[in-house]
Image (cartoon, grey):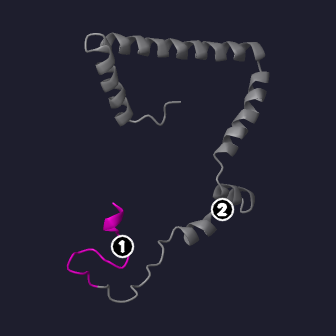
Amino acid sequence: MFANVGWGEILVLIVVGLVVLGPERLPGAIRWTADAARQARDYLTNASSQLREEMGPDFDDLRQPLSELQKLRGMTPRAALTKHLFDGDDSLFTGMFDQPPLQRPAEGPAEPLPPGGASTAHQTPYDDDAT
């Protein structure tokens, strides 16, 4: 759920919490949040284990289509072609697409810049009377 939260985002949250709550209430708020997250995780673990006990072997039958759906969500076009057309052998793709692109040679000497330093060929016109 929070796999994409990095250290930068955590630092921003701490700074915002420090500004909003103040230094004396911030540790208590962090402790309360950690306890609430731990309690929610325990509730979810207990609920899934209770559901597994009540459903028995049907629980695994329910989870199998969900795991297959999760595999399909991560399937890229390259992985789909490899799996279905080439039986998992991706040696065709590794040699062809993993090479660096060819470098185009320069088309000739570069134009020297005018004394102002900027090229006047690509500048938009400027009208002093319009301003």
Residue 78: x and y, percent? 64, 59
- In which quadrant of the rendered view does residue 42 lie? top right
Extreme-front residue of the structure: 129
Asked if disc 2 and disc 1 are in contact, CB closer than 8 Å, the reply is no
**What amino acid is labelled 1 in the image?**
Gln
Element class at badge 1? loop
Residue density around tag 2, few if under 14, some if 14–19, many if 20 or more, within 10 Å = some
Question: Residue at the location (35% across, 36% down)?
Answer: 8
Q: Which mark is residue 123?
A: 1
Going 71% across and 15% down the picture, which residue do you hit?
51
Residue nearest the viewer, comparing 82 with 69:
69
* Residue at image point 31% right, 85% down: 111
Q: Name above or below for residue 91 compared with residue 111.
A: above
Pick the front one: 98 or 109: 109
Q: Where are the magenta residues, as a range? A: 112-131
Type of the residue with mark 2: Asp
Q: Quadrant of residue 14?
A: top left
Closest to the observer, 26 or 114: 114
Looking at the image, which residue sits at the far left?
115
Residue 68 drawn above or below residue 58:
below
Work out whether residue 122 or residue 84 is closer to the camera in this orientation and state it: 122
| Residue behind mark 2 | 89
- Percent position (x, y) of residue 113? 26, 81
Provide residue 3's location: percent of width, then percent of height. 49, 34
Drawn side of residue 77 relative to residue 129, left or right: right
* Residue projecting furthest to the bottom: 108
